[in-house]
Image (tube, rainbow, N blue to C red):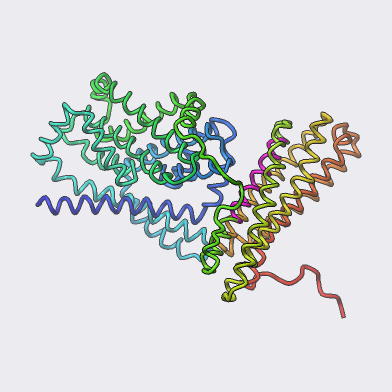
């Protein structure tokens, strides 16, 4: 076969692999994006949970870059502390390595079945089914691409030119690392490069040392795309990507220095040469996670010194451009981004209140009033800005969108008021008096807090996507909260009748917090009403008609 045909076959197979990866990522985000993000944001209370959150999210999304960008955005919004973010990315790196190890098991025969199943599942009407179908199709294409890559590289394994090139790398391991890193950075996928190395691993001319260097280079290059993608983001987001790059770079250099001692032992007969790249890939990332996780705190301090926070002139709105007022589409897009930012501030208030409940820490309450002041200021600016957009001639659809933005901003401001004037005061009273809820009462409140935070995150997604199915789930979740609040109140009254001391001391606080969380969920659910109303899925009243 000519060199041109071999190159086309190889690059086409790699392109199919990258396309399959993209299909899996997009499909999983479409089907479970809100739940993945919520789980990732919630699963970072300690190092072990952070590690497994990153691992699971990356296996689901088939992209450590996607996980890194999500984590960076969470750090930017103060939803994840930087130290835990670095541990999440260590888990993400292991998740990518596990994916490479799984796809190397020789499951190509599953490709047609997965393509068929994905096609059938994807014909459903819900976004979950469509996304799941796309993800199954993506996995099928990935497995198919592995077969094509194996066939495309078959002539290369006996190529005299490639043998000569591999022979040159025997004495230039750093060059092998740089070449592989460049390929991984260009492809935005370390997995694709490791799979390509896997297809060449059985070549007799590729010795173990350069092979290890190529795998290390793929790991290093995989850390570059998040750095480039966050180049214009806030310093807090850029620090996450930079920390991951530093860890990978130091780990790769250390492993490269040790490769000369490790390679002779890897060449022992028990080690399978065919799967050596994915074995090295997984072993490297597991070792890196074990060694780097305890250093997450000093790494965060180092990145803070390298990328200090930029001075900010104001904590007001960021996207309400006065120059866009003459272009309603652009103006409303900016207002939508701004109101989502208000939702993020309210989420931070809820998270702080929940942490104060869990840790009995008055310092957790200090930031709530500051955040509520920012919510008030920004939502007022949004209302004024959107009213100025409405002064010009705009289409009816744009007018409805403007009203939806204002309504959501008002409801978020009401939620902020409930948190500050209700939950904040109640938690401060509990802490000041040294009171403690009963174990059952504390569990009930914690569960309702977690549900409320998840519902607010779903409301953000509903506002951004206007997805009917998600909007329906949000309204149904409001009814679930009402039922939980009623059940918790009844159980609390039963504990009072049983004479439990903790319940007697905290009775008014418990009932007031239940009421406030129910009110918050009622405001959260209102974002779904105009979406369901436009789709004809919302009735005018829940009251039965009077008998005539």
- The image quarter in which residue 331 lies: bottom right
Please report the residue visible at 49 percent of the width from the left and 36 percent of the height from the top.
88
Please report the residue visible at 33 percent of the width from the left and 28 percent of the height from the top.
252
Answer with left or right where residue 406 lies relative to residue 185. Answer: right
Q: Position of residue 539 (x, y in %)?
A: 71, 71
Work out whether 378 lies above or below 247. Answer: below
> Overall secondary structure of the magenta stretch?
helix
Q: Which residues are magenta?
A: 339-356
Closer to the camera, 62 or 435? 435
Closer to the camera, 309 or 95? 309
One can see residue 307 in this view: yes
Tally of marks = 0
Q: Residue furthest bottom?
A: 548
Answer with left or right where residue 303 lies relative to residue 146. Answer: right
Closer to the camera, 200 or 318? 318
Please report the residue visible at 43 percent of the width from the left and 51 percent of the height from the top.
25
Please report the residue visible at 35 percent of the width from the left and 40 percent of the height from the top.
222
Q: Position of residue 453 (x, y in %)?
A: 65, 47
Answer with left or right where residue 247 lies relative to residue 147. Answer: right
Residue 354, magenta (yes or no): yes
Residue 142, magenta (yes or no): no
Work out whether 316 lies above or below 260. Answer: below
Q: Position of residue 427 (x, y in %)?
A: 78, 37
Work out whether 520 lies above or below 368. Answer: below
Q: Position of residue 367 (x, y in %)?
A: 68, 38
The quadrant in which the C terminus is found is bottom right
Answer with left or right where residue 479 lies relative to residue 335. Answer: right
């Amino acid at each position: 076969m000519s060199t041109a045909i071999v190159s086309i076959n190889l690059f086409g197979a790699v392109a199919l692999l990258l396309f399959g990866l993209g299909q899996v990522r997009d499909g999983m985000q479409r089907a479970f994006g809100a739940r993945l993000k919520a789980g990732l944001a919630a699963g970072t209370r300690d190092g072990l949970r952070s590690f497994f959150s990153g691992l699971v999210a990356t296996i689901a999304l088939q992209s450590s870059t996607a996980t890194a960008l999500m984590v960076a955005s969470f750090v930017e919004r103060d939803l994840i502390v930087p130290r835990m973010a670095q541990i999440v990315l260590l888990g993400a790196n292991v998740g990518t390595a596990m994916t490479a190890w799984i796809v190397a098991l020789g499951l190509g025969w599953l490709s047609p079945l997965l393509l068929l199943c994905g096609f059938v599942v994807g014909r459903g009407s819900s976004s979950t089914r469509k996304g799941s179908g796309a993800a199954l199709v993506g996995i099928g294409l990935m497995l198919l691409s592995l077969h094509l890559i194996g066939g495309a590289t078959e002539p290369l394994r006996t190529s005299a030119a490639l043998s000569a090139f591999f022979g040159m790398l025997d004495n230039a391991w750093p060059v092998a690392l740089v070449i592989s890193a460049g390929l991984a950075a260009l492809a935005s996928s370390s997995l694709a490069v490791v799979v390509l190395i896997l297809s060449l691993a059985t070549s007799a001319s590729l010795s173990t040392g350069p092979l290890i260097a190529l795998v290390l280079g793929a790991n290093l290059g995989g850390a570059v795309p998040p750095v480039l993608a966050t180049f214009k983001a806030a310093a807090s987001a850029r620090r996450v990507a930079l920390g991951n790059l530093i860890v990978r770079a130091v780990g790769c250099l250390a492993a490269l220095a040790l490769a000369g001692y490790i390679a002779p032992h890897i060449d022992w007969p028990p080690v399978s040469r065919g799967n050596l790249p994915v074995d090295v890939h997984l072993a490297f990332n597991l070792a890196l996670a074990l060694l780097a996780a305890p250093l997450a705190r000093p790494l965060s301090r180092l990145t803070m010194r390298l990328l200090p926070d930029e001075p900010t002139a104001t904590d007001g709105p960021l996207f309400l451009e006065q120059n866009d007022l003459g272009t309603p589409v652009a103006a409303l897009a900016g207002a939508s981004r701004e109101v989502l930012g208000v939702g993020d501030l309210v989420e931070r208030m809820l998270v702080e209140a929940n942490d104060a409940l869990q840790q009995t820490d008055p310092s957790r309450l200090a930031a709530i009033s500051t955040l509520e002041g920012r919510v008030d200021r920004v939502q007022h600016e949004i209302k004024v800005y959107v009213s100025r957009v409405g002064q010009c001639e705009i289409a009816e659809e744009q007018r409805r969108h403007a009203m939806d933005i204002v309504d959501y901003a008002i409801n978020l401001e009401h939620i902020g008021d409930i948190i500050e004037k209700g939950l904040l005061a109640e938690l401060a009273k509990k802490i000041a008096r040294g009171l403690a809820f009963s174990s059952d009462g504390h569990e009930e409140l914690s569960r309702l807090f977690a549900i409320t935070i998840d519902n607010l995150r779903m409301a953000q997604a509903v506002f951004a996507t206007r997805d009917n199915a998600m909007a329906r789930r949000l309204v149904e979740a409001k009814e679930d909260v009402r039922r939980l609040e009623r059940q918790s109140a009844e159980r609390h009254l039963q504990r009072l009748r049983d004479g439990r001391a903790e319940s007697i001391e905290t009775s008014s606080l418990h009932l007031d917090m239940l009421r406030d969380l129910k009110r918050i969920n009622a405001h959260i659910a209102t974002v779904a009403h105009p979406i369901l109303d436009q789709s004809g899925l919302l009735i005018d009243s829940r009251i039965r008609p009077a008998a005539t």
